[in-house]
Amino acid sequence: MEQQCPRCRLINPPEAVRCDCGWDFLAGNGAAARFSRSKSIADQAKASWVCPLVAWLSQFMIAMNMTGMRGLGLFLLAAALVQLVLLVVGLVLGIKIVTMDHTLVRPTDRKSAWAGVIFSGGTMALILAMFIAAMVG
């Protein structure tokens, strides 16, 4: 169903997100929807770098506290899987924010998302490089 812009009365196609006059159909008529959406984007951008940070910190704690302990194979495997999930979540959230329309993302949120992409992607690249080096050496 076509939608009429409340500001200029122009008829827009049903899939239109924004009218030619600048009216944002997703935000509606109030700033609350716009704030809610930008808060969600900010939360996701922050999570994009917090997830790999938690993975790094947990690995550091494991390395410092459990070196030399026996019988931890399953625990270490579970920890590695959780860390991998955190890295993937950070990467996916970061890429999602970075590839969004520039008008929807504040510059600080875009920078946070880039930090998450670099942090998560760099960590994955480091893990892969270490794995390859262990296999070759």
Image (cartoon, grey):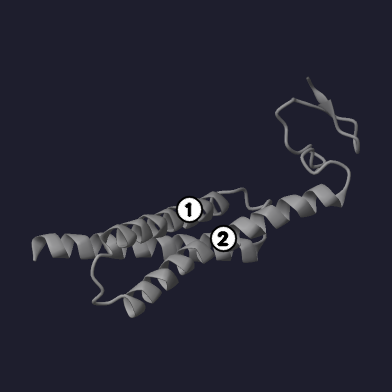
Vertical order, 8 against 45 (above or below):
above
Q: Is residue 136 visible?
A: yes
**Quadrant in the rendering for residue 28:** top right
Residue 105 visible to the viewer: no
- Above or below residue 131? Residue 11 is above
To which quarter of the image does residue 98 belong? bottom right
Find out whether the residues at labels 1 and 2 contact each other: C-beta distance under 8 Å: yes
Q: CA distance from mark 1 to mark 2?
A: 8 Å
Element marked by disc 2: helix
Could you tell me which residue is drawn at 71 percent across and 57 percent down?
39
Q: Residue 103's x, y, as percent? A: 68, 52
Residue furthest to the left = 137
Q: Which residue is mark 1?
A: 89
Where the N terminus falls, by quadrant?
top right
Examine the rendered structure and indicate whether residue 15 appears above or below residue 120: above
Identity of the residue drawn at 57% across and 65% down? 112
Q: Which residue is denoted by mark 2 in the rendering?
A: 47
Position of residue 18 in the picture relative to residue 43 (left or right): right
Between 97 and 40, which is closer to the camera in this rendering? Answer: 40
Left or right, 62 with reference to 8:
left
Residue 7, image x and y in percent?
91, 38
Give, as a three-letter code, the residue at label 1: Val
Task: In the rendered structure, find residue 104 and report the number of the disc placed on it.
Answer: none
